[in-house]
Image (tube, helix red, strand yellow):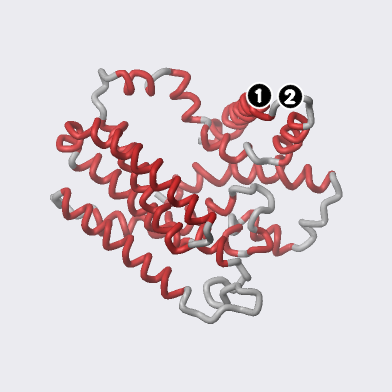
């Protein structure tokens, strides 16, 4: 499992980091990569462990740090959730316990006197601001991973009971994801970080329900036929590459050029999307797929 995850994620990450971030930055004379520790942190996918490299290289790389930690623990957590012949309520209940335990540990890390600048001394030895800690720490995100894992186990073990509920899961999950996302954004804007973290988890749970409903929908439905289109299937295969390149230095430079033109930025969005998708297709075809 770990080897497959490493092959799936790391080679294309390292390639994108090198040629989509570090090489362009060095050609521009950036001093950001002068320290060997920076190179170790970036190529070790450790952006979420040190504030100094948090958005360096691949700006979304911090999320891969969280994934790394989760993948190390996932076989044990999955085995705990997925006991033989466990009923649906048992899987959901234990998933809720995992989320609550992690939330409790997350809360305990915050019961520490703040530093002179209002930053926590204990949660991050790297000086991560409290706002980022609520967004980008493993403790803040593990409930979302647990929710996704519960959804996957329910689909694998109890599909016959999920299929009749597919429509309700799609509609209810979509509504919950959107409502809690908007409420979470409002809480974040009001600097109510604990409430924001809770609402974000509820929004993620709604998204998990939505995906569970889509994955279990009968193949003859309009949604299933639409999602099975060859183009969408192919875009799904290239989506990880798109995730890596969409905020890379070359794409950011192109975006800066587009918004400087005398056109509304809204018209620049589909253009930059097509460019980013084209870059992700090239990355998928030349690097990701051959390595797989």
Residue 65 visible to an observer of this rendering: no
Q: Residues within 10 Å of mark 2 (few under 14, many from 20)?
A: few
Picture residue at 66% right of the left edge, 24% below the top: 267
Q: Position of residue 89 (x, y in %)?
A: 16, 52
Instruction: Look at the picture and state if 211 lies above or below 132.
Output: above
Give the image quarter of residue 75: bottom left
Location of residue 76 (image quadrant): bottom left
Query: In the image, is 22 to the left or to the right of 140?
Result: right
Find disc 2 in the rendering and name its residue: 263
Q: Is residue 177 visible?
A: yes
Residue receiving disc 1: 267
The residue located at (68%, 50%) in the rendering is 57
Residue situated in front as seen by the camera: 244 or 118: 118
Q: Position of residue 260 (x, y in %)?
A: 79, 31
Q: Compared with residue 43, is residue 257 higher up or lower down, i.e. above or below?
A: above
**Given contact means CB atoms under 8 Å apart, are the residues at marks 2 and 1 in contact?**
yes
Which element type, helix, strand or loop, lies under badge 2?
Answer: loop
At 74% from the left and 32% from the top, the residue drawn is: 259
Badge 1 element: helix
Q: Is residue 24 left or right of residue 15?
A: right
Q: Give the x, y percent position of residue 129.
A: 60, 66
Q: Nearer the viewer, residue 34 or 143?
A: 143
Q: Position of residue 55 (x, y in %)?
A: 65, 53
Which residue is found at the position 20% from the left and 34% from the top?
Answer: 165
- Which residue occupies the extreme right position in the image? 29
In the rendered image of this protein, does residue 203 appear above or below residue 121? above
Distance from disc 2 to disc 1, alpha carbons, whole Å, reads 7 Å
At label 1, counting other C-alpha atoms closer than 10 Å, the crowd grade (few under 14, some 14-19, many 20 or more) is few
Compare residues 247 and 77 and report the one nearer the observer.
Answer: 247
* Tag count: 2
């Amino acid at each position: 499992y770990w080897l497959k995850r490493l092959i799936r994620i790391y080679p294309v990450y390292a390639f994108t980091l090198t040629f989509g971030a570090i090489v362009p930055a060095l050609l521009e004379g950036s001093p950001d990569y002068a320290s060997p520790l920076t190179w170790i942190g970036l190529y070790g996918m450790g952006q979420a462990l040190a504030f100094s490299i948090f958005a360096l290289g691949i700006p979304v790389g911090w999320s891969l740090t969280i994934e790394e930690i989760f993948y190390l623990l996932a076989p044990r957590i999955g085995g705990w959730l997925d006991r033989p012949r466990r009923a649906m309520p048992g899987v959901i209940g234990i998933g809720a316990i995992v989320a609550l335990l992690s939330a409790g540990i997350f809360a305990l890390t915050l019961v520490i006197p703040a530093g002179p600048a209002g930053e926590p001394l204990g949660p991050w030895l790297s000086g991560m601001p409290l706002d980022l800690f609520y967004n980008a720490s493993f403790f803040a995100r593990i409930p979302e991973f647990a929710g996704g894992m519960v959804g996957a186990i329910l689909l694998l073990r109890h599909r016959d009971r999920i299929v009749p509920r597919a429509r309700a899961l799609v509609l209810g999950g979509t509504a919950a994801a959107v409502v809690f996302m908007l409420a979470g954004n409002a809480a974040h804007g009001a600097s109510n970080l604990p409430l924001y973290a809770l609402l974000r988890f509820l929004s993620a749970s709604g998204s998990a329900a939505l995906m569970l409903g889509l994955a279990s929908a009968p193949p003859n439905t309009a949604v299933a036929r639409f999602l099975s289109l060859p183009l969408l299937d192919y875009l799904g295969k290239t989506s990880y590459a798109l995730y890596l390149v969409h905020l890379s230095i070359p794409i950011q430079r192109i975006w800066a050029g587009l918004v400087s033109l005398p056109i509304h930025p809204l018209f620049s969005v589909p253009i930059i999307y097509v460019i980013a998708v084209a870059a992700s297709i090239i990355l998928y075809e030349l690097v990701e797929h051959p390595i797989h």
